[in-house]
Image (cartoon, rainbow, N blue to C red):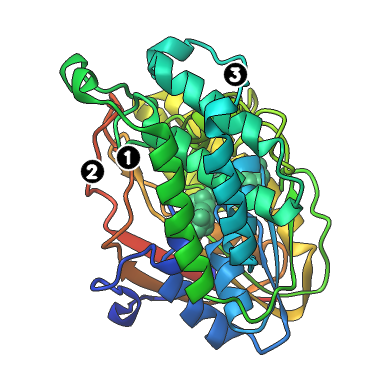
Amino acid sequence: MKCIERIKYPEFDFKEYKASEGRHSVHDYPAMLHYLLVNHLIKNYSSENSLIYDPFCGSGVSIVESLKLNRKAFGTDINPLALLIADVRASNFETDRIRDVLDRFNIEWNNLTPDIPEVKNISYWFKDYVIKDLGKIRTFLRTVKDNEIFKFLLVVFSQTVRDVSNNRKGEFKRYRLSEEKLKQFTPNVRKTFISLVEKYLKIVETDIIPFTDFKLFLQDVRVSIPIKNVDLIITSPPYGDSKTTVAYGQFSSFSFDWLKGLNPYGDGDLKLDSLCLGGKKIKEQKELPSGHLYDALKNIEKIDEKRALEVYSFFYDYYLSIKQVVKTLNDNANVCFVVGNRTVKGIRIEMDFITAEFFESFGLTLENIFVREIANKRMPLKNSPSNITGKTSNTMLNEYIVIMRN
Ligand SMILES: C[S@@+](CC[C@H](N)C(=O)[O-])C[C@H]1O[C@@H](n2cnc3c(N)ncnc32)[C@H](O)[C@@H]1O
């Protein structure tokens, strides 16, 4: 790897700013990029009208920021819920027409017959009256014919499902409220839905997107990517497999259940976690072009062979993704990968260096590695051997922004 010093860059910390302001606060999503960081990177590494691509676009922070800066934006993700959220965050709406639909919703509410999808352990995760009311919203949604309004309301419905479920609030994994808290938990489903419609309407009508040229694809980036002529890639990939880092499938599972058959980007289920990078263990290790990965694996193997294989499996998938991502780039394109260097079994995995080495193996040049302190990112407990649900940790204090050039 080209010898390079990591540069601490406090200008990228944005400690006094919330990570999810304005459009980025429409619907929760785990491990979001800080929008101010993305804004800065787009300005620095691309020009107006260029094409920006985020291979792991999640809820679409880089899509929204690209459009705001008059760039075209493409995104891919394996999670259909993420794409739906990104789509709505990146779109402008005729808000008066949404208000008309909301009026009709209020008029029809008492006469709606619930449409309740098949949900495993539904009564464990939702109170009976909540199930009925969510079913009524589902019935209403089916009557909304305008595609854009439908997507907007679907995102509202998805967040409503999260808010009125028996899951602990602010928890990304499935983790039920305590019996005591459950007794006091009596959410009003209709009111929750209406107040989220109003909240999101205010956001989308005050924060207009000036440029609306974007495309989103449901895609496993390890396999292929239907995109070409990219000028800049900005992304934050997963930092490890879903089991030990962020469980995107678990996070999305309640919404998957209730949005079944409705999301234009497709349905999903809990199996999503096994489709994310590192979701399946690879039996045999092939050599990957990274000395830093090799060193970390050797050390983890001495302590726990099985864990070393899990780490390898993640990085094998990560390598396959980078191989595909590189094919989308124009000559002289820039790449910004925002990664975290986590610790497994006490061994630090230098994902920033590994990322640089993978890209270098495809002919790109490492330009810089900037280090920022994470102030606002909520992460589940990463390094505990028990990976206890519900705990968050401060162990990953830095984010590394790896800048490569084609
Ligand atoms: C760190 S998150 C991205 C968050 C995003 N930057 C944002 O601001 O919302 C990583 C994303 O990678 C996606 N992902 C995981 N495995 C994938 C794969 N094989 N192909 C495409 N996307 C994948 C997950 O669904 C998740 O949305």
Q: Amino acid at mark 3?
A: Ile
Q: Residues within 10 Å of mark 1 (few under 14, many from 20)?
A: many
Distance of mark 2 from mark 3, alpha carbons?
A: 37 Å
Does residue 34 appear in this view?
A: yes
Circle 1: element type? loop
- Mark 3 or mark 1, which has the lower sequence index? 3
What is the x, y in percent for residue 238?
51, 47
Circle 3: element type? loop
Q: Is mark 1 within 8 Å of ligand 1?
A: no
Q: Is mark 2 within 8 Å of ligand 1?
A: no
Q: Amino acid at mark 1?
A: Pro
Q: Which of 197/70 is in front?
A: 197
What is the x, y in percent for residue 366?
56, 74
Query: Residue 133, labelled with which disc?
Result: none
Labelled pair 3, 1 in contact (Cβ < 8 Å): no
Query: Residue 116, labelled with which disc?
Result: 3
- Mark 1 or mark 2, which has the lower sequence index? 1
Residue named by callout 1: 380
Q: Quadrant of residue 405?
A: bottom right
* Dot in front, 3 or 1: 3
Residue named by callout 2: 393
What is the x, y in percent for residue 43?
54, 86
Q: Amino acid at mark 2?
A: Ser
Distance of mark 3 from mark 1, alpha carbons?
A: 31 Å
Does residue 319 appear in this view?
A: no
What is the x, y in percent for residue 162?
43, 35
The answer to whether 74 is drawn above or below residue 403 in the figure is: above
The answer to whether 19 is drawn above or below residue 368 in the figure is: above
Q: Quadrant of residue 230?
A: bottom right
Q: Which of 346/259 is in front?
A: 259
